[in-house]
Amino acid sequence: MNENFYTLNEEFKRIHNLGWIKSKSHGSGNVGITFEYLLGKERENFPIADYNGIEIKTNIENFSRQYITLFSAAPDGKYIFQTQVLKEKYGKNDLNSQNNKTFYARIVANKLTLINNYYMKIELNYNTNKLILKIFNAKLKLIDEDCFWDFTTLKEKIEKKMKYLAYIIAEKKYTKTGVYFYYKDISFYKINDFENFLKLISNGTIKICFKVGIYKKGPKIGKTYDHGTGFEINKKDILKLYKQIAIQNRDQGESTKKR
């Protein structure tokens, strides 16, 4: 049991009791940024868990976004910037910037996915201990398998970033004075073993998502942005990857929730 679950649970109770809180930022992610502000955390982008070994994920109640990004891991390969190579070779021209390409793809291991006239899938190779991105042309001829992720790298990512998870549900409302959040509920989880993680990739439960686009406005308009290569899971499948931990009073310890 991560002892910091107790501390975070008490912090959540404090924030919950504050009621409706005005957003501390604008745009996507502001519900999480506002919660971290209330925790006293500065915004950062490190490959470690958010709060004393616990990764925090926030979501708006009844929001349509289905997927949780577990972590981001750029692929290795022949080239230093392998994702940019994928964009140039297999992306499509942006509608408003024909000289620039975008590459959006959600790819799984249990079936081929059609992306910009190419078929793609993930292969788990237990001989080389790699996840390999396989790309086929329209006639299903293999044309590229240069992109990969080492199992060791992925395991390290999970240990540093996603071993313990706090999942927070918030309500959102708009007023004349801005956007407000009410932090309603928190759940705690501990990940199952790495072999289970790989199994969930192999059966398509965990997906790999590329998000390389073009800035539409502002000082960087027309330039490429890369939102990272995310390993994602549907919210409804979270208990396939994690065990839920019921937090009781500190002297009572923990229990594992059964659902």
Image (spheres, helix red, strand yellow):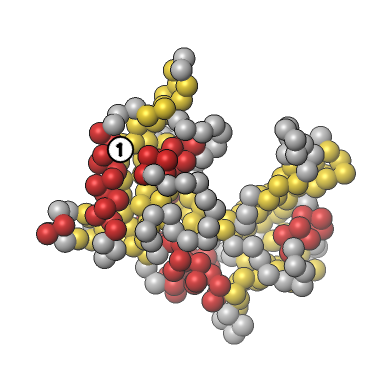
| Location of residue 185 by image quarter | top left
Name the residue at 24% across, 47% down.
Answer: 10
Please tell me whether residue 43 is drawn above or below residue 123 in the rendered image: above
How many discs mark residues in the rendered view?
Answer: 1
Q: Amino acid at mark 1?
A: Ile
In the image shown, does 200 or 84 lie closer to the viewer?
A: 84
In the image shown, does 124 or 9 lie closer to the viewer?
A: 9
Q: Residue furthest top?
A: 176
In the image shown, does 191 or 180 lie closer to the viewer?
A: 180
**Residue 94 placed where, x, y %?**
80, 41
Q: Quarter holding the N terminus?
A: bottom left
Name the residue at 68% across, 70% down.
Answer: 76
Residue position for label 1: 15
Please tell me whether residue 210 is drawn above or below residue 36 in the rendered image: below
| Location of residue 123 by image quarter | bottom right
Q: Residue furthest right?
A: 99
In this rendering, would 7 be left or right of 122? left
Name the residue at 59% across, 75% down.
Answer: 150
In this rendering, would 7 be left or right of 178? left
